[in-house]
Amino acid sequence: MFSDVMVNSTPSDIAVDIRSVTKKFGERTIFGDVSLQVRQGEVVALIGPSGAGKSTLIRCVNCLTPFESGSIMVLGHELHGTNEAKRGPSREMLKSIRTETGMVFQSFNLFPHMSVVDNVALAPVLVLGTSREEAREQARELLCSIGLSHRVDAYPRHLSGGEQQRVAICRALAMKPSLMLFDEPTSALDPELVGEVLGAIRALVDRGMTMMLVTHEMMFARDVADTVAVMADGALVEIGPARQVLDDPQTDRCKSFLSRVLQQKAPSANTSAPSMGAQIAADAPTQEHEQARDTDRKRKHAEEVER
Amino acid sequence: MNIGFDTSQMLHGAVLTVELAAGGVGVSLVLGALGGLARSRGPRWLRWLIVGYVELVRGLPQILQLFILYFGLTQFGINLSPFTAGFIWMCFYGTGYAIEIFRAGISGVHPGQLEASTALGLSRFQSFRRVVLPQAVARMVPPLTTFVILELKNTTLLYIIGVPEIMYHANLLASNSQPLNIYLIAVGFYLVMNMTLGRLGAYVEHKMSWAKS
């Protein structure tokens, strides 16, 4: 998959450098004083409860949202908080940042009035000046590499959620970005469709793509991310190597978040040790679990019907 | 066909009705598109100006608007012919409604669409032209069909100030003949015109069927 995705590299080793950034909506602080570095080729997963500011943080990186104070260096471009800079970033800089940064949204946001291939080919034509023919050819190749060759001429509304999200990934990759931002890419999907999208992301990780990934898929984060950053209550509460943070969280806030998330996944077992390692151990006899839960559900359903 | 009177007059009236409606709709759509765009994207003072204009159009009875234009302005020495006053009113009134249709169409496009195109590096103009506008127009087709039909029917009001459109001739003829027969002929004219417009709108809507999600 993605055999022809080229991962560009900029001179500096640091792809994204977020320095004490504060973001407010009106009076309300979304997050304050967050600092985070992403190296070239690094995959950073952002996890944490809803409303912690994870999505807003990656939106600040490609300037979809301005921030109040602090600064962000993205692929060599400097962004400053609105409180500190006299004027916002220039159009040219915004264009470079967004061209070199791909973004995938929770709700796909494909363009419904265009066929799949035109969704992917639009930006290369308009922004990079690629010829229409060439852009469509490249789009076809990308779509083929992700297993959507049969969907090239379909319209987005004819696609499943998983297919739509994979097209959205192709659309971002068509700009040959050196950084990918994923904003909860699987949260809007039916459980059975999550795998195909995670598979596409994993293929990109294997190609060495630099990534910031907001996700609720803890197992996936543990698997593919180099670094996990946990955000809660408007702050970065813990950051470190993925397995270390997920298996052996240090801060109380992070522990309580992980225990809640993991308990949801396995309601019956494993109440005392909420870490990821224990979770995996507990998950080993998965089929038994599933069956037990299934019969449980059927029994409850039968009772309801009787009533 | 001899039914006791000359229907050719009504045919002339129908031609005038279509001319007035087509002209009024044309001007209204152009001004409405600009106004709707300014209403959703323009500077604050311009937005308020447009809001005021729409309130004026929407809040006043049509006859009052028309009479102010035709009779009221004579006080300032502005004597408009019935046709001119009528046409200006059609544009004045139509623009107000068209602005609202365009504004609703633009604001109905999911904000994620603009985000996605912005994140891809498209300029504001490119995003609007290639992503937002096509979707807005598709959403506007049904209300625009209704709007065009409304404009066409509104031409009947102009008979009051003496514009010789269909109703004007129908009333003339009705006063010295059987009124119901005359009015039924007018019914025929309007139904043919408006059902044609309705079918046209449905056809365009069908052509943009990707918009149904």
Image (cartoon, coloured by chain):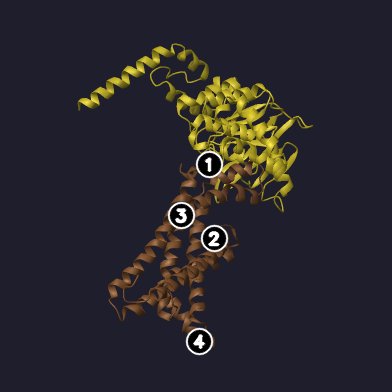
Chain colours: A yellow, B brown
- Chain holding disc 1: A
C-alpha gap between disc 2 and disc 3: 24 Å
- How far apart marks 3 and 4 lie (CA) works out to 40 Å
Q: Chain of mark 2?
A: B
Quadrant of residue B41 in the image? bottom right
At label 2, counting other C-alpha atoms closer than 10 Å, the crowd grade (few under 14, some 14-19, many 20 or more) is: many
Q: Nearer the viewer, mark 2 or mark 3?
A: 3
Q: CA distance from mark 1 to mark 4?
A: 53 Å
For the point 51% across and 20% down, which residue is it? A275
Which of the labelled discs sits on residue B36, or is there none? 2
Q: Position of residue B184 (x, y in %)?
A: 31, 68
> Is residue A148 something one can see in this rendering?
no
What secondary structure is marked by label 3?
A: helix
- What amino acid type is highlighted by mark number 4? Thr
- Image height of A72 relative to B96, above or below: above
User: What residue is pinned by disc 1?
Assistant: A112
Is the residue at mark 3 from the same chain as the one at mark 4? yes
Lateral position of residue A198 relative to residue A83, left or right:
left
In the rendered image, residues at marks 4 and 2 fall on the same chain: yes
